[in-house]
Image (cartoon, rainbow, N blue to C red):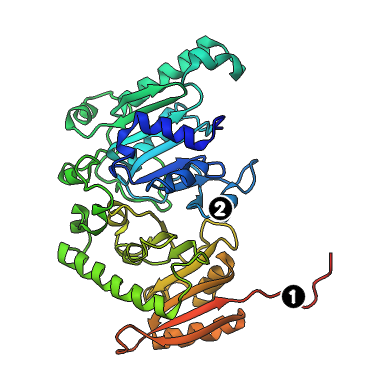
Amino acid sequence: MFPRGVSAYVDLMQDLIPEMKDGTVRTAIDTGCGVASWGGDLLDRGILTVSLAPRDNHEAQVQFALERGIPAILGIISTQRLPFPSNSFDMAHCSRCLIPWTEFGGIYLLEIHRILRPGGFWVLSGPPVNYENRWRGWNTTIEEQKSDYDKLQELLTSLCFKLYNKKDDIAVWKKLSDDSCYNKLNEPDVYPPKCDDSLEPDSGWYTPLRSCVVVPDPKLKKSALKSIPRWPERLHVAPDRISDVHGGSASAFKHDDSKWRVRLKHYKKLLPAIGTDKIRNVMDMNTIYGGFAAGTIDYPLWVMNVVSSYAANTLPVVYDRGLIGTYHDWCEAFSTYPRTYDLLHLDGLFTAESHRCEMKYVLLEMDRILRPNGYAIVRESSYFVDAVATIAKGMRWGCRKEDTEYGVGKEKVLICQKKLWYSSNRTSR
């Protein structure tokens, strides 16, 4: 994929996109990520990438990526929207990802357009980019490759993308943020058309793909890439989109931010492994604004922030802070392989969801995705903490109940570790 190594590939990309160097670009998605080498290299450069791949004939790419300690999730652009909000990623990338971008009316590129922030970048390397010099190695003709490239460029123009830069095998397009292009979508017989108001832009859980353009909300001009604060300042600045959350405000955001700083200091005392090389892959199972992830930002770990598909839609706020996450319903299995996370954190999940999801099945799913010797921090009322401790004992977890940071109220913290054990009747091999 990268003949001179992934670092040389990203160096060239940074030359084409200077915004990757100054904190403007912070969140990225890699579609068809392979073993996530691109995302892994970007981590060292301060860019947090969601590496996305299916389980196909390349086998367990996402599992390998997570074993490397790189953020990754099982997923595919097929018939359903990806589980992310609109206008969230600063950058999207495809390197020979084999996604037929111009087929089916460009529906897959329409989904990239939906999740990409206005002013964000879409990077394509491999066919048909640089077809003039590469077509002989692609088992095709130069005419076919030129036709493919022209179709792609025409589609991107119709979606309000503009060619930003191009060199060798890499081409970069930028999603326009001004209204002049999007206003043309109101004209009759234009394809693809503008999505009607009945289709919620942020709906990303069991929502079918649609052949229409999600136009950025004019009220959210400050969510455009050029307007949002650069990393790391954006981590602690209340985003505009917090006003879309019921009860959300700048003061509520600041209160949440300071609350989690205190909580993380307490967690560190209860679980000294936090911040060491023992914990790398972390999941916050029911975040609100990403406070837990923000509190661990100086530690050598990354956090997958999960927002319940039944809860208030706070995931756009998480992305505007420069963090990553996904929608999920904990009545179902999470899109990852077994034994891929080192630490799971939940705060009031059972209080909020126990009327829908049976607790033992959620805990069994936690056991599935947690590595042997991995940890879980369960913050709940005393009632649920005791109930969790009972079930955890049956899963051969070791748990201890602790007070919260202030030691008052009915809330408790349960610190658990999944033990490494083997079936007593296993056959030797």
Q: Position of residue 94 (x, y in %)?
A: 46, 34
Q: Is residue 144 above or below residue 69?
A: above
Using residue 205 as the reference point, say whether residue 157 is left or right of it: left
Which SS class for mark 1?
loop
**What's the residue type where badge 1 is placed?**
Ser
For mark 2, what is the residue? Answer: 68
Q: In front of the other: label 2 or label 1?
A: 2
Image-quadrant location for residue 371: bottom right
- Which sits in the foreground, 274 or 427? 274
- Quadrant into which the C terminus falls: bottom right
Crowding at mark 1 (Cα within 10 Å: few <14, some 14-19, many 20+): few
Instruction: Name which quarter of the figure residue 1 lies in.
Output: top right
Q: Could you tell me if residue 7 is visible in this image?
A: yes
Left or right: residue 428 compared with residue 318: right
Marks 2 and 1, how far apart at CA: 28 Å
Q: Residue at x 37, y 34 (%)?
A: 14
Secondary element at image label 2: loop
Relative to 374, say whether 245 is above or below.
above
Query: Percent x, y for residue 413?
Result: 41, 82
For disc 2, the neighbor class at 10 Å (few under 14, some 14 to 19, many from 20) is some
* Residue closer to the observer: 428 or 140: 428
Query: What amino acid is found at the position of numbered circle 2 in the picture?
Result: Arg
Q: Residue at x 44, y 67 (%)?
A: 275
Where is residue 314, by image quadrant?
A: bottom left
The residue at which mark 1 appears reads as 423
User: Which residue occupies the foreground of this view, 287 or 18?
Assistant: 18
Considering only order in the chain, which callout, 1 or 2, is on the residue closer to the N terminus? 2
Q: Which mark is residue 169?
A: none
